Image: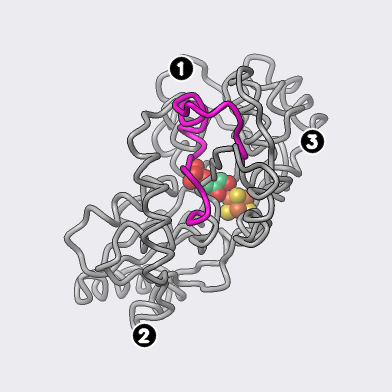
Amino acid sequence: MDQAQLKQRIKALAVERNALLLAHNYQRDEVQDIAEITGDSLALSMEAAKTDKAVIVFCGVHFMAESAAILAPEKIVLLPRVDAGCPMADMVTAEGLRALKAEHPDATVVTYVNSSAAVKAESDICCTSSNAVNVARSLDARKLLLVPDRNLGRYIAEQVPEKECICWEGYCPTHDRLQVAEVEKAKTDYPDALFMAHPECTPEILALADHICSTSGMYEFAKTNPAQTFIIGTEEGILWRLKKENPEKSFILPSRALICPNMKLTSLEDILACLETMEPRITVPEAVREKAKLTLDRMLTVPRD
Ligand code: 13P
Ligand code: SF4
């Protein structure tokens, strides 16, 4: 089958199965193209909860499909590649977090959505890269445990100096790889460009940014800012929609290393196979799901940064 035939077959089977195709902003271009909705991890999980469709095909990584299963337990959530994980989410376990909590019993645990359901269930509230600072500010607690991303954690800590912040030492291998010299070179090559960076980048990279925001924030900034050229400090999959929505603007990726291998695993063939077999299905044990849902529900009451 060529790509056009594959896409046609996927669309027909999705209708037959009453399935909604969701794709994260970092997925391959052809996967984003076939999806009914593209977006960030939380927005997609909320779409999963909202839809009337019985089946969700989540083209992303494991924790995202889990978030959909937490918010929409009555639906069948499929992850086309069960081996698509997030190394950062895997850097913290529920057991490890329990040990840190025991050392700091007076702290409130703020956990990034890039985490397993079991870790969310051990937390007080979740955050995403688009509401992390507001979530931290909304809490009465003076002491926060920020889990698992040390880069997002340090960024939050800087914005809420009135709180004591203890950061878990996890990181995103893709964002953490971006080098200061690469960004400086792009800035020299494109002196009029603005640099937008995701808070998963290191503090040294964030110090060079004109705008620090989530992937959704980047779409908004590129559309509304009059600048013509933007240097992008996040995974390259974001370029597909940035270029589509802003055909007259230029987007520069400062490093070839900004590719998340896990996000790139899902192919059209995998999507078709998963619709044919209705596997792999992602479920969360009910006791964990209920606790994890509370942390997401608390977060949803806080507005975006
Ligand atoms: P979003 O929360 O913007 O979807 O980001 C998820 C992610 O994996 C970032 O690296
Ligand atoms: Fe995880 Fe980083 Fe890949 Fe996002 S880009 S899924 S944080 S490894």
Say what secondary structure mark 1 lies in.
Answer: loop
Residue in front for this viewpoint, 163 or 204: 163
Mark 3 vs ligand 2: CB below 8 Å:
no
Q: Which mark is residue 225?
A: 1
What residue is drawn where x is 45% and y is 72%? Answer: 80
What residue is drawn where x is 61% and y is 23%? Answer: 163
* Outermost residue toward the right in this view: 181
Q: Are marks 1 and 3 in contact (CB under 8 Å)?
A: no
- Pick whichever of labels 1 and 3 is earlier in the sequence: 3
Dividing the image into 4 quarters, which one contains the C terminus?
top left
Between disc 1 and disc 3, the foreground one is 3
- Classed neighbour count for the residue bearing mark 1: other residues with Cα under 10 Å, few (<14), some (14–19), many (≥20): few
Say what secondary structure mark 3 lies in.
Answer: loop
Decide: is 117 above or below 296: below
Residue in front for this viewpoint, 111 or 237: 111
Decide: is 14 above or below 164: below
Magenta span contains residue 61? no
- Classed neighbour count for the residue bearing mark 2: other residues with Cα under 10 Å, few (<14), some (14–19), many (≥20): few
| Amino acid at pointer 3 | Gln
Q: Are marks 2 and 3 in contact (CB under 8 Å)?
A: no
Q: Which mark is residue 277?
A: 2
Q: Is residue 51 visible?
A: yes
- Pick whichever of labels 2 and 3 is earlier in the sequence: 3
In the shown orientation, is residue 47 left or right of residue 194?
left
Residue in front for this viewpoint, 64 or 197: 64
Q: Which residue is mark 3?
A: 179
Residue 203 x/y as whole percent: 73, 29
Residue 29 x/y as whole percent: 48, 54
| Amino acid at pointer 1 | Asn
Q: Which residues are magenta?
A: 120-146
In the shown orientation, is residue 178 left or right of residue 296?
right
* Outermost residue toward the left in this view: 52
